Image: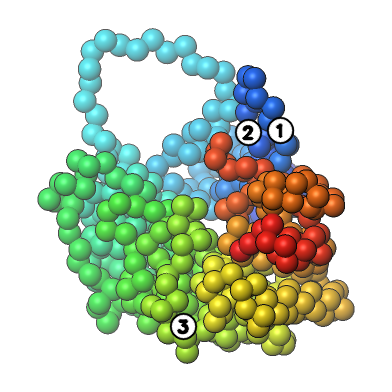
Amino acid sequence: MPASIDTLPYEILSAILEEVMSISLRDLPKYTYGLSQAPEPLQDVQIQRVVRGLKAPDTVQWEASNSIRQVNRAGEAARGNPEPLSRQSFSDMWEYRWMDSRNLDKSQTRYAKTTVYRDPYYSLKKAAELFRQSPITAAYVRRLWFDGFYALETSAIMFKILRLCCNLKIVTLPWTALRYGSADDWSQLLGRGRERRHITSLELLAVDLKASQINDIANQVDRKALNSSSINFSSLKRLKIFGSTNFMPITDEDMVGISRTATNLEELHVTGTSSLTIKGIMAAAQASKSTLRTLEYSPLSADGFVHPDPANYDPKNHCCHMLLQCQQLRDLSISLPSICPDIFRHLPLHWRGVVQIRAGGLHGFYTDPKDSTEGFQQFWNTIKEAQALMESRLKDNIQLDIELFINQWIFEPRFSRVHGNIEIGELLSDGLWPISKTSSCKGPRGHTSTYGKEDRPYSCISEESFRKGLRHSYISF
């Protein structure tokens, strides 16, 4: 029986603490809360307390491990253990510094009047120097996150660090690394050679750059590494692309290039981007259709419901049928050009939890469905098929909640409810429609709550009231 927890082997102690973190994650709040909008003078504004949205996964994990770090940091430093218990190494620590600063008093620093130049890439270069001088330290690194390094010069340093950390599992890079990295850089990162372990998770983060960075000729380089046959993404289990940029964005062509070898993905997350369309997403999903478990495609809010013109997408490659080929798919949140009842009709489906499907319309009907008897019937058949699928999963003791976002309307088939802005319909009906309504915490862009003064609060009505509103032309799609 060990006299102290510090005497336990590192592997056992790490396993214990990771289990403690997983338990803490279940108890921590994962949502942020706020008001729908700020009150304004001389205005009658209905204020709602609403759920804003999910916290970032990294923030939740940091909070879950906060108490562990406070009691374990000194012990780890005394033992000289080069591997952090959190199994994460960050090149830029600003995010962690900000998180830790919430527990600190404001500093009383007096700033000197003398201007001192400091290399903006100092931390990146020091990290490269540390790993070069201490290969043992580099061998213990499991995760690297590079944030804020978008120049060609910094890309070379990042790939140098990546080569030194031979046991990496998770890597987060700026999207420019896809342009600046050579075929040799990427093939080594993805595990070329038997002596190197493969990375299993790759994240590419994009942001808008300043005009000076965009116009810098030194940065206008694209080595087109994806065209090389030496690059193989088959070791990846998770691929995440986040953010939109005004400089050499990731496109459908890039996704098709990645999909040629990314055949074992279990998770695919593409969020907050306006340069990738459903064509690139479906290419990646089809390449990993036998292994894909989680698929998230949430475009940038401003472009989220402006989908590619149906004429530009081959009708033979109907997205609903292509999604159904992903037999292992469990978690789904996706924006589609159109949907049809078939997406819920074919069994078995392993979907669970909350499934969100955003669509620009119904397959084959690109105008208001009520303008066609067939289109009107197909829409309600889609709702019925979603209800039947949820009941089927419930018989297997699996909870499934489907949310459909058709243009500016949000449907909850389980509860036969519809969310949307019905103010115009109320005016057209002289207040006679709907008979009853409640306040909704869902907003117009597929997210909870409302964002900005131009977004009016949503109301919740029954499906029957929605049908009546369509029949009397109080509302439309």
Quarter of the figure with the C terminus? bottom right
First along the sequence among labels 3 and 2: 2
The nearer-to-camera label among 1 and 3 is 1
The secondary element bearing badge 1 is classed as loop
Alpha carbons under labels 1 and 2: distance apart:
6 Å
- Please give the label number shown on residue 37: 2
Task: Count neighbours of disc 3 (C-alpha within 10 A) and say few if under 14, some if 14 to 19, many if 20 or more.
Answer: many
Q: How is the image coloured?
A: rainbow
Residue at coordinates 47% horizontally, 86% vertically from top-left? Answer: 315
Specify the quadrant of the image occupied by residue 103: top right
Q: Is residue 29 left or right of residue 98?
A: right
Q: Residue under circle 3?
A: 287
Amino acid marked by disc 1: Ile
The type of residue carrying mark 3 is Ala
Q: Which residue is mark 1?
A: 47
* Label of residue 464 in the image: none
Is 452 on the left or on the right of 181, as rendered? right
What residue is drawn where x is 40% and y is 66%? Answer: 276
Picture coordinates of residue 197, whole percent (x, y): 43, 71
- The secondary structure type at the circle numbered 3 is helix
Tell me which numbered mark, 1 or 3, is placed earlier along the sequence: 1
Viewer-side label of 3, 2: 2
